[in-house]
Amino acid sequence: MTSPARQTRRRVTVRAARWDDPAGAALRAAMQTEMEIRYADRIEALAAAAADLHATLDVDEGQVAYVGLAYAGGEPVGHAALRRLGGDLELKRMYVAAAHRGTGVSTALLAATEDAARALGARRVILQTGDRQPDAVRLYEREGYARIPVFPPYEWLTFSICMEKVL
């Protein structure tokens, strides 16, 4: 019997989209809300100490090289983007709606995003996540990402975990 909190794997389709796609914007907003709750105490302290918190965490649409939206049953359930950061592509806003976690969406979305990075000529994908996201860290490690030193602009975020995957 399947636990009600865990759905069975279902067919997932990942489609390239524009950064301003309404489904992608809604998924990013849901992620933002979840992260604000998860890191509320730290964000408050950082905001008081650093005026450029939003400059560090926001994504400039002009730097976005790829956006992927994952659909399950015709419903948008996941989002990932690649932004240009120096000579690298950085995974940004990787998010799966809570009701669809554990169903294969994140794996399909990450694979499609890595394929897009290869098509864009990247030799690696880098990312930054936080220490209160052990589920994300486990996913990335399982999919071949390795920890690297914290890279700019995240070096002042003391809870950062940075990773890379050589493609």
Image (tube, grey):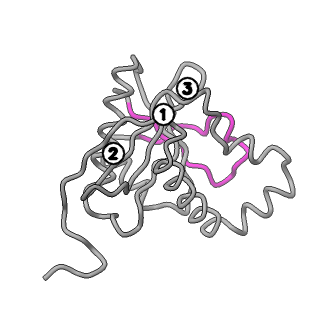
Pointer 3 residue: 84
Q: Is residue 160 magenta?
A: yes
Residue 55 position by quadrant: top right
Pointer 1 residue: 82
Name the residue: 31% across, 30% down: 115
The residue under label 1 is which amino acid type? Leu
The residue under label 2 is which amino acid type? Leu
Residue 45 position by quadrant: bottom right
Q: Viewed as shown, does residue 158 lie left or right of 50?
A: left
Residue 111 appears at what percent x and percent y? 29, 39
Pointer 2 residue: 109
Question: Could you tell me if the residues under marks 3 and 2 are in contact, i.e. CB atoms within 8 Å?
Answer: no
Q: Viewed as shown, does residue 64 lie left or right of 111?
A: right
Label 1 vs 2, first from the N-terminus:
1
Q: Which span is picked out in magenta?
A: 146-165
Crowd tier of the residue under label 3, counting other residues whose Cα lies within 10 Å: few below 14, some 14–19, many 20 or above: some
The residue under label 3 is which amino acid type? Arg
- Label 3 element class: strand
Residue 26 appears at what percent x and percent y? 52, 55
Q: Is residue 17 above or below residue 49?
A: above
Name the residue: 33% across, 45% down: 109
Give the distance between the C-alpha atoms of the residues marked 3 and 1, in whole angstroms: 7 Å
Q: Is residue 31 magenta?
A: no
Of the pair 155 and 27, the residue shown nearer to us:
27
Name the residue: 50% across, 60% down: 133
